[in-house]
């Protein structure tokens, strides 16, 4: 019985690949939509759930709750990633989206601080922790699923993991732009900010249904898997690989959350209308959604590390000028140019990242390895990025502070990429030796 599904999946690979991409991205919409919406509506959520006498303190508390979700992501990577490597990619994807649906529902229905007092921020914080746990395992499960179904088009298939991030940014920006334009401030605080979460509640069951219909990846079916994949075994067998996976994930995460912070940055630092930041992120999200598959496609023909090294240097060289442009000429045009350019650079990096990550680990520990390395990078450098940016601006008074963070994290990823290239060249030199002998 186990032999029958394999020829069917192999025979129908081209349409199957399209179906697998749709299944992974539909679930990913729900997984990431809530995170982007939270960052976009941080100023409003601060008023509803974390009121304080000082607006800056209130916003810092809100971003602290945002960042807390990222501290449980490595735990989610260990639990759900390990489960995915034992039970299958499909099972892991179903588990992660089911957990995310619970967290999204809590965000949508929890009354504000004015109604239920201290219980409101507690429930919201618990919701963030559950969502962080879920997404911690989602990334490695989805990347393994897409890369293993991709075959010779692994770069293109896996790139949709981040192309979805661009789509979500566009979707969340449309919500933000529409709501901030049509509703008064009081309406937005009272009920308007909940509309995107209600939408997420509707997407969840559809994603769950579609994922339930997918087939398992051929690589996983053929692999001889151990009964358990403990994190200690992963760290013992592949310590350097995990460290390098973490390293190359740093700038992808820091740039994602710094760019998600732009609507807040536009309002609080540049004193622009809320619609300006949402419009800029909408355009940038569209560039990311289109660019990721293109760069993923090119990475199937060009060296993946080389493409990412170029993108890393562009982050180092152009982050400061991009923020300088927004600060010197605070306007819609300046924000669109700066955010659009940074999202294009991000597409060149993040569109290639998932396939390169998947290639670092063998199939039996791929989901937990990718999840743990990536999620640890998110916990340290991604989820806290809005908090760090807000704190740096408050402490230094320098509106260009977020660019320093991008430059620093890009340099860290650059070191990891150089190490991966060195290991790859070394392995290539060593392979012919036993063959000629």
Image (cartoon, grey):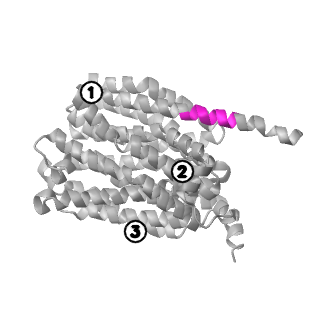
- What numbered label is drawn on residue 205? 3
Q: Residues within 10 Å of mark 3 (few under 14, many from 20)?
A: some
Between discs 3 and 2, the one toward the N terminus: 3
- What numbered label is drawn on residue 399? 1
Spot occupied by residue 335 in the image (x, y as percentages of width and height): 32, 31
Mainly helix, strand or loop, the magenta region? helix
3D distance between C-alphas at marks 3 and 2: 26 Å
Q: Residues within 10 Å of mark 2 (few under 14, many from 20)?
A: many
With 76 as the anchor, is 195 left or right in this view? left
Q: Quadrant of residue 54 in the image?
A: top left
**Residue corresponding to mark 2:** 370
Between discs 1 and 2, the one toward the N terminus: 2
Please tell me whether residue 161 is drawn above or below residue 316 in the rendered image.
below
3D distance between C-alphas at marks 1 and 2: 35 Å
With 323 as the anchor, is 412 left or right in this view? right
Between discs 1 and 3, the one toward the N terminus: 3
Q: Furthest-bottom residue in view? A: 1
- What numbered label is drawn on residue 421? none
């Amino acid at each position: 019985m186990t032999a029958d599904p394999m020829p069917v999946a192999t025979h129908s690979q081209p349409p199957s690949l399209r179906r697998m991409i749709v299944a992974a991205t539909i679930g990913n919409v729900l997984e990431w939509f809530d995170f982007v919406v939270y960052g976009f509506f941080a100023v409003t959520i601060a008023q509803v759930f974390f009121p304080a006498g000082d607006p800056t303190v209130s916003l810092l508390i809100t971003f602290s709750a945002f960042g807390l979700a990222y501290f449980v992501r490595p735990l989610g990577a260990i639990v759900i990633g390990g489960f995915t490597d034992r039970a299958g990619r499909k099972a892991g994807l179903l588990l992660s989206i089911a957990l995310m649906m619970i967290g999204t529902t809590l965000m949508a229905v929890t009354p504000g601080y004015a109604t239920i007092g201290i219980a409101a921020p507690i429930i919201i914080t618990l919701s963030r922790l559950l969502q962080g746990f879920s997404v911690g395992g989602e990334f490695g499960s989805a990347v393994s699923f897409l890369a293993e179904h991709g075959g010779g088009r692994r770069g293109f298939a896996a790139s949709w993991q981040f192309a979805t991030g661009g789509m979500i940014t566009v979707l969340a920006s449309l919500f933000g732009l529409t709501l901030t334009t049509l509703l008064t401030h009081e309406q937005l605080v009272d009920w308007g900010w909940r509309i995107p979460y209600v939408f997420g509640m509707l997407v969840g069951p559809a994603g769950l249904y579609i994922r339930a219909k997918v087939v398992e990846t051929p690589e996983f079916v053929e692999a001889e898997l151990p009964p358990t994949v403990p994190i200690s075994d992963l760290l013992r067998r592949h310590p350097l690989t995990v460290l390098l996976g973490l390293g190359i994930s740093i700038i992808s995460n820091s740039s994602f959350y710094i760019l998600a912070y732009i609507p807040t940055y536009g309002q609080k630092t540049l004193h622009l209308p809320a619609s300006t930041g949402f419009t800029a992120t909408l355009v940038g999200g569209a560039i990311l959604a289109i660019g990721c598959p293109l760069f993923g496609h090119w990475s199937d023909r060009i060296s993946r590390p080389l493409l990412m090294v170029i993108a890393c240097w562009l982050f180092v060289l152009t982050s400061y000028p991009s923020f300088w442009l927004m600060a010197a000429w605070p306007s819609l045009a300046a924000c669109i140019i700066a955010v659009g350019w940074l999202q294009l650079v991000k597409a060149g990096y993040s569109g290639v990242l998932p396939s390169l990550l998947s290639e670092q680990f063998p199939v039996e520990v791929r989901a937990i390895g990718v999840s743990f390395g990536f999620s640890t990078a998110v916990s340290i450098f991604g989820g806290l990025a809005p908090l760090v940016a807000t704190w740096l601006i408050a402490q230094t008074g320098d509106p260009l502070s977020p660019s320093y963070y991008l430059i620093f994290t890009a340099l860290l990823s650059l070191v990891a990429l150089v190490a991966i290239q060195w290991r790859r060249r070394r392995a290539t030199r060593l392979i012919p030796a036993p063959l000629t002998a």
